[in-house]
Image (cartoon, helix red, strand yellow):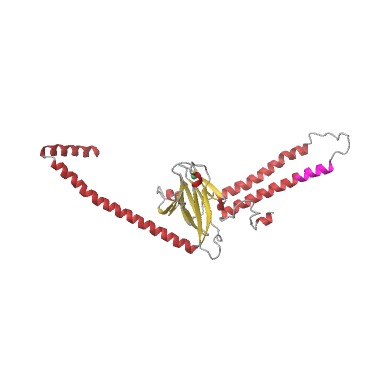
Amino acid sequence: MAATGCASNEYTRLGLPEPITEQAERVLMLWQGSWVAAFAVGVLVWGLIIWSVIFHRKRSEQLPPQVRYNLPIEALYTVLPIVIIAVLFYFTARDQTYLMETDEPADVNVEVVGFQWSWQFNYLEESRAEAVEAGREIPTRVFSVEGTPDDVPTLVLREGDVVHFDLSSPDVIHSFWIPAFAFKMDVIPGHPNEFQVQIKDDVVPEGEDSATFAGRCAELCGVDHARMLFNLEVMTDEAYDAWYAEQEAAADAEAEQIQARADEENLQEDPQSTGDQVREGDEGPQTETAEDDESTAEEEAGR
Ligand SMILES: [Cu+2]
């Protein structure tokens, strides 16, 4: 079973989806290893039961010798489960440490914002930890992909990339889950979570630009929880570069537009303030002096 496990087909994966990250590969090994261990224990127990049933059936009316307190057997009953649990614990702890590692320099940093009820993927120049280390409070955002329950967002990643995820939520606890990662992590307001994956090299089928996978929220977070879906699109080098450049250009264009609009509003504001002065002047020479004094007083109080 362990040998066929390496072939990784639908049956040997024992219910897990095909892994698309190195980390998911490790999760699959742990999953299969646990089943092999459980199956071995099962075979032993079933074997002993069958052996007892066949070779120690009731043969006469005579009561068999009554024994109790067989010390070696009692010790075995205690020691064996401890050994089994210790082995499972060792591999679980070892793999958990590996899955939570974030030391490797990432090719891309994505901030995942889970909100009621969709997702926002912010592509960053650096991870949150790197920004804090460099003395900046928040990392610089390159562009952003935001979805709604009706228009599910697509997280785009590149084959072979090390991807760093920073998770955050503005409202309640969500859970960021991509089944093909064999991994999910809670998205908790006020508690920054992070993890990294290495996307495998052979995710996109030969001759195609990308492969699409499902993503969802795995934490009941409110009435529209079931609509918190998203897609993961893993692209080839070329397709990803083109997509990334397009997003960057769109973000730049939008920023320019916002800047232009802000400039326009500033220009409009100036004549407005002149208008106020004109109106004050219209009210007559007596009140003008009084109001001028008042406004000077207000200004000083404001300072
Ligand atoms: Cu949610």
Depth order, front residue of 90/60: 60
Picture quadrant of residue 2: bottom right
Foreground residue, 35 or 68? 35
Q: State the residue lying farthest toward the bottom.
A: 207
Report the side of 121 relative to 87 (left or right): left
Q: Quadrant of residue 62?
A: top right
Q: Position of residue 213 (x, y in %)?
A: 53, 55
Please report the bounds of the magenta region as a residue range. 46-56
Q: Position of residue 218 (x, y in %)?
A: 53, 45
Choose between 239 and 226: the one closer to the eye. 226
Position of 248 compared to 274: left or right?
right
Q: Residue at x 50, y 53 (%)?
A: 231
Would you place residue 35 above or below residue 245 in this image? above
> Looking at the image, which residue sits at the far left?
285
Tell me, yes or no, if residue 2 can be seen here.
Answer: yes
- Quadrant the N terminus occupies: bottom right
Residue 113 seen in this snapshot:
no
Q: Is residue 49 magenta?
A: yes
Does the magenta segment cover residue 262? no
What residue is shown at x 68% (from left), y 50% (from top)?
36
Q: Position of residue 118 (x, y in %)?
A: 46, 47
* Residue that appears at 44% across and 62% down: 242
What main secondary structure does the magenta stretch of the protein show? helix
Counting every numbered tag in the picture gives: 0
Q: Nearer the viewer, residue 32 or 156?
A: 156
Query: Is 206 placed above or below 139 here?
Result: below
**What x and y, as percent, mark residue 108?**
47, 56
Quarter holding the C terminus is top left
Looking at the image, is 16 positioned above or below residue 246?
A: above
**Residue at 41% from the left image edge and 60% from the top image edge:** 246
